[in-house]
Amino acid sequence: VTKPTPYAAFGELLVEGIKQTSLARRESLQQTHQFIADDLGYGVTTLYVWRRGEHLPDNPETVANLARIFAVAWQPDAAWITRFLELGEYGPAEAVEQLNAELFGDLLPVVSSPTPPVQPQPTPTRSRAGHPVVLAGLNFLAAIAFRLLEILPDSLSSGFLERISRTSPHDASPEINLFPITCGDHGLNLAEQRLMVSTAFGAYFTGLLEREQSYINLQGQIEVQAASRRNGLAPLQSLYWALQQPRGPRLVLIAAEGGMGKSTLAARLVRCLFEEEAVDMILGDSAKAEQVDPASGVIAPLAPGYDDPTSFFNRLYDQLGLPAEDGPVRSGLAVRLIRDRLAGRRAVIVVDNLESVSRGMTLLRTLRQLVSRDTRIIVTTRTTSGLEQQSDLLLVHLNPLRQPEHARAFLQWHISRYAAAQPGLQALLPDLADNRRLRTLIERTGGIPLLMQLVVSDVARFSWRHLDHLPQLFGSELLDFLYRVRWDELGQLGTTGLQARLLLRFVSDEQYRGQAITLDRLYQWAADSEPAAPPQQALELLQERFLLVNHDITVGNFAVFPSLTEFLEQQEG
Amino acid sequence: MTGAPIEWDELTALAETLSQPGLSPGNVPRAEWEKIETTLAQLLAANDWVGILRLRRIFKELIARDSVTVVPIFKRLSQAAIHAAEQVDDKAELAHLLGADGHNLHRQGYHQAALDAFERSYQLYEELGQDFQALQNYYMTSLCYRAMEKRPQARQVLETVLARVAPDDIWRANPLQVLAWLAQDEARLDEAEVLLREAISLYHENSGSEIQAAGALADLGEVVGLQGRAAEAFTVFDESLAILARFHGQYDRQEARTRLKLAELLVRQGETGRAMQLLDRADDMIRGYGHYYDLMWRIETLRAFAYFNDRQWVHTTRKLRLALYYRRKIGLSNRAFAQQLVRRMVLGIGLPR
């Protein structure tokens, strides 16, 4: 039972007033809250405190101003206003009466001569197009202004214009509400942007954005650079806090080895920014082996999807609906056009796998010109050489899972998520209490999450003794070994194994093509293949080896890890 | 390259699948477009003109719609088909293909190129004695003239067309709608409203004209709003959006156009926040397709206007500059834009289009 708040009755009336105002103004409740808060000169959170009935406005005049806003917006009757003022402890009955009179007209000053009755106005005649000379002058001025607008550099005009511009309510918001630690837990509905996100980043990253609870917040894994760390806050919240600072870094660089969860953390940040309505547009690209035209689906063989600033900007042009340049993209013009397109939007630009880009540092330098209060950039990379000294970016390192308790939490999450696809995992749950086993697992995998997941799937298939047979390899070498063993194993499993290999290639090829890879599509693919055979067994082989992940248990939304795609590109047959 | 025999039945089935409501180009798997791409390449390599025309005919209905006209394979297929029709000297087919190409060019803002295509098509139909088809293409030149600020020519075309169409012919709705635009351009809003209402009632008589009706309703909403009847205008816009919602994904450009007009009314009403939300939605609906620059510059112009009203000068200049950039890219005069902007603001008849 919720404890009643001291001013609950006032809160209820306030909620009603806000809802009616929202309806009358034909805007969202959120916009109405912002409008009222701005009008009163308070933050939106304070409005919520009053709504919940925890406090009354500290100043009776604020209660009166609220009543005035409601009276203008949706004309409540005098009884409603009276009750609102009384519950808001506006003042004695005389004061309430006086305000009511002001709102409902009784105290209007008497004018000496009666106002003439309002005559219905005919629709204003619009046949007057103005004096030709005046019009010609205006045309001339407008044409000159347009020309200047096109040729003048930003630096000459923007400073002056910024000074004389009105501050929008959005600009003026002084409050920083700390995003909760659960921010980004929920999947996103990408709506119209799904196609673009999926073709740019692939089914794996899209799945990370869309599915529920994709990331487990592990203590000690995220290391935020010292300047942005906040005492008493978990690393993830320090990161959120830094992103919210009006003068804080707008460029987040997530650095770690493959399989550490860079994409997962990037997706988590995007989800949180969306959830908090800090962004409404996802742009960017993943340095991958092929690029798809979002409209036609035609694949252009590129290695990788972007490899220098020019190709990255071309990608942004496509995503923003900007016409392609006739010649090579000039970075100055590109930055100006992209900034112009993004003005008024809240965007996040994701640059995945920066280390694959030949002129990554040049790209990063150019991208910095795009960041603003409303445009954030998230970069994932495996290397950080030359980056530490940069002050305007927030560097985040992902550490391996070194402690048994962290590994335990991670594996418990892994089992709960993937046991449906690999039932053998369930039997490992009691074993996770054994620190000795966990330490061995950490030692053999280096504490890299993806390696732990792959090895644990082997442990579920064989036994813990399997750890003893792993070679002394680390990082990408071990990852390559694990993929290689699985690939070879599938080759020895007859027609089902071969079908599994083909299925893996199909998913890997299809995952940058915009559409979710559902179970129906896999069955269709299997029916169209030679020889046609149901894919169920092949699917089981892949899932129990953790080669295929499914983001949607109901209809299926399959993807492979980007590192596996890289491995498959090197395989024949 | 001769390749494997072409699976015509499979392509026909594909065309049917792609025409389903609720399917936008973005939802079509790559492999589906590849089938068309491969077939076209095969036919071109073999100089199989008849085959190319057959392939184009299979996707005729799909190409006639808004959403896929900008898909590169269909642009290539249309160009190849025009060339094929010239090669086999099939005048009727060529006239049809040129007309369809004119529609696509006009939608994207290439009005002079569209005008050329419509005029060629019209002449071919005249030579063939197919009067109605000739008239339809002649009518389309009025849209191009208007878009290029040549209103007297546009009016002359429309008056000629209307004089040649029977008073009870429901096709009259089309020229009436464009005549309404001209009346609006000349600040005769009451006349524009009457014409649009007549056009809408004719569209409603024809069960296959829902999309045209939705477009005309958007125009009516705009005209009614400009006359100060905002509440009535909102209802009309809702009606237009309700029709488009039934074809989810197939007419994104039309839906974006209705949202743009509704947003313009909201900006004039001072509801900038809500207008911006609508504009963002319209923008998100079409920016992924690329190529719809004619609509993009109008969206950015309205944003500039909204920021101007809000006295946010930096954003105003950014958006206006972008509108100018888009226009320049599709060959539209920015001097004409300046004149149109001044004239329309003075007359109070909405933003340039």
Image: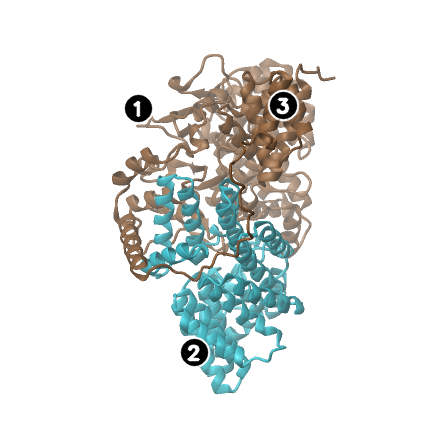
- Image x and y of residue A156, in percent: 25, 40
Residue at coordinates 62% horizontally, 25% vertically from top-left? A413
- Image x and y of residue B101, in percent: 47, 70
Secondary structure at numbered mark 2:
helix
User: What hue represents chain B?
Assistant: cyan
Q: Are marks 1 and 2 in contact (CB under 8 Å)?
A: no
Q: Measured along the vertical axis of the image, is residue B260 above or below residue B141? A: above
Mark 3 or 2: in front is 3
Q: Measured along the vertical axis of the image, is residue A327 above or below residue A555? A: below
* Amino acid under disc 2: Arg
Q: Is residue A532 left or right of residue B218?
A: right
Using the image, name the chain to which the residue with label 3 belongs. Answer: A
Q: Is residue B178 left or right of residue A492?
A: left
Secondary structure at numbered mark 3:
helix
| Both labels 3 and 1 in a single chain | yes
- Image x and y of residue B95, in percent: 48, 78
Chain in brown in the render: A
Tell me how far mark 1 sits from mark 2, CA to CA.
64 Å
Residue B258: image quadrant is: bottom right
- Image x and y of residue B260, in percent: 50, 52
Using the image, name the chain to which the residue with label 2 belongs. Answer: B
The residue beneath circle 3 is: A97
* Amino acid under disc 1: Gln
- The reply to whether residue A318 is in sight is no
The residue beneath circle 1 is: A389
The residue beneath circle 2 is: B120
